[in-house]
């Protein structure tokens, strides 16, 4: 898939077919995520793959978007390792860059994915459910599967609304 | 450029030729940035283009990486509009996703770019220099130009170091 085409045609996909996602695909998605830049190349991101229906149902309790997680073929839980972090703002940005690589890579594989953030309100309970160390902080859950919804329109502000100044010499 | 190839071959480029960067390219880089996802599609990012040597030199004072900004053909200053924000962590992540789209797009154009974060220590002075409203918060400066350095090696942790658990059903 062409890079710019991928950026412009990626959408948040919230309904999925029954078709499973291969482990190799999930590994490649995570690997692409890790090729994001990070400050001092500190790579603060960590990951958990969930491809197990009972656990999907347990995780789904923690968000009002439970149907997405229940129906997803797989979830990738994205964590920040506080022991690797050096600056909260910059580390959070780097993890956003990492997730964007993951979403683009999933899209290039013909998968649909959505970045779930609302679930962060239950970070503490999720840490207990998934039993990861206390120095790991929940950053997002990415739900994935083959899309079961038609291409959606989306919209963005015009350039004139977001480009607030230009200085030309 | 192929999407995955772009993700894996992008590098932080810190030295540039004299060749100018066209306004159309900078606009396309910003536009691609805005196609990142954001929570509630709030699109908190704002941008300033700087393509003016005197201003590059003034901005360069505010970072120990001054030679990068001085030599860059253009800089894109990335801001967060606090009036559009809803959650600091998620908005910062979204801006990271936006910047990653920008870096990938620059790379696909044959440009080199680097995400500068250390300069944030002088956010207040930069707000005065560039005279943007107080509700705009400096997030990063992206320096750009045609690369004047050879392809660089970079490295990332192995998957086994970052994938801390897997649950399969």
Image: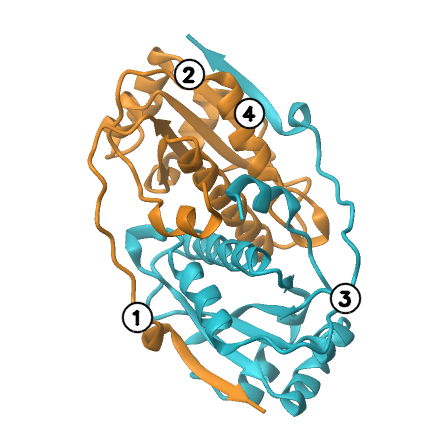
Chain colours: A cyan, B orange
Whole-Å distance between the Cαs marked 3 and 4?
A: 34 Å
- Sooner in the amino-acid sequence: mark 2 or mark 1: 2
Q: Secondary structure at mark 3?
A: loop
Q: Which mark is residue B87?
A: none
Residue picked out by circle 4 = B27
Q: Looking at the rendering, which quadrant does residue B45 occupy?
A: top right
Q: Which mark is residue A148?
A: 3
Instruction: Tell me, yes or no, whether dots 3 and 2 are on the same chain.
Output: no
What chain does badge 4 belong to? B
- From where the camera sits, is residue B139 visible? no
Q: Secondary structure at mark 4?
A: helix
Residue picked out by circle 1 = B158
- Sooner in the amino-acid sequence: mark 4 or mark 2: 4
What chain does badge 2 belong to? B
Instruction: Tell me, yes or no, whether dots 4 and 1 are on the same chain.
Output: yes
State left or right for residue A73 relative to residue A38.
right
For label 3, count other residues whose C-alpha is less than 10 Å away and answer few (under 14), some (14-19) or many (20+).
few
- From where the camera sits, is residue B148 visible? yes
Q: Secondary structure at mark 1?
A: loop
Report the mark closest to the observer, 4 or 2: 4
Q: Which mark is residue B51?
A: 2
Residue beneath the point at 28% across and 52% down: A40
């Amino acid at each position: 898939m062409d890079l710019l085409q991928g950026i412009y045609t990626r959408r948040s996909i919230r309904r999925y077919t029954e078709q499973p996602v291969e482990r190799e695909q999930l590994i490649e998605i995570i690997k692409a995520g890790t090729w994001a830049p990070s400050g001092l190349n500190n790579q603060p991101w960590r990951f958990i793959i969930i491809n197990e229906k009972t656990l999907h149902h347990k995780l789904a309790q923690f968000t009002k978007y439970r149907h997405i997680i229940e129906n997803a073929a797989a979830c990738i839980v994205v964590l920040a390792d506080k022991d690797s972090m050096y600056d909260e703002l910059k580390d959070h940005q780097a993890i956003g860059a990492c997730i964007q690589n993951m979403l683009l890579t999933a899209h290039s594989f013909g998968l649909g994915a959505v970045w779930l953030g609302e679930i962060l309100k239950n970070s503490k309970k999720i840490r207990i459910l998934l039993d990861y160390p206390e120095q790991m902080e929940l950053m997002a859950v990415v739900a994935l599967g083959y899309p079961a919804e038609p291409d959606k329109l989306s919209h963005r502000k015009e350039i004139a609304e977001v480009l607030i100044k230009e200085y030309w010499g």
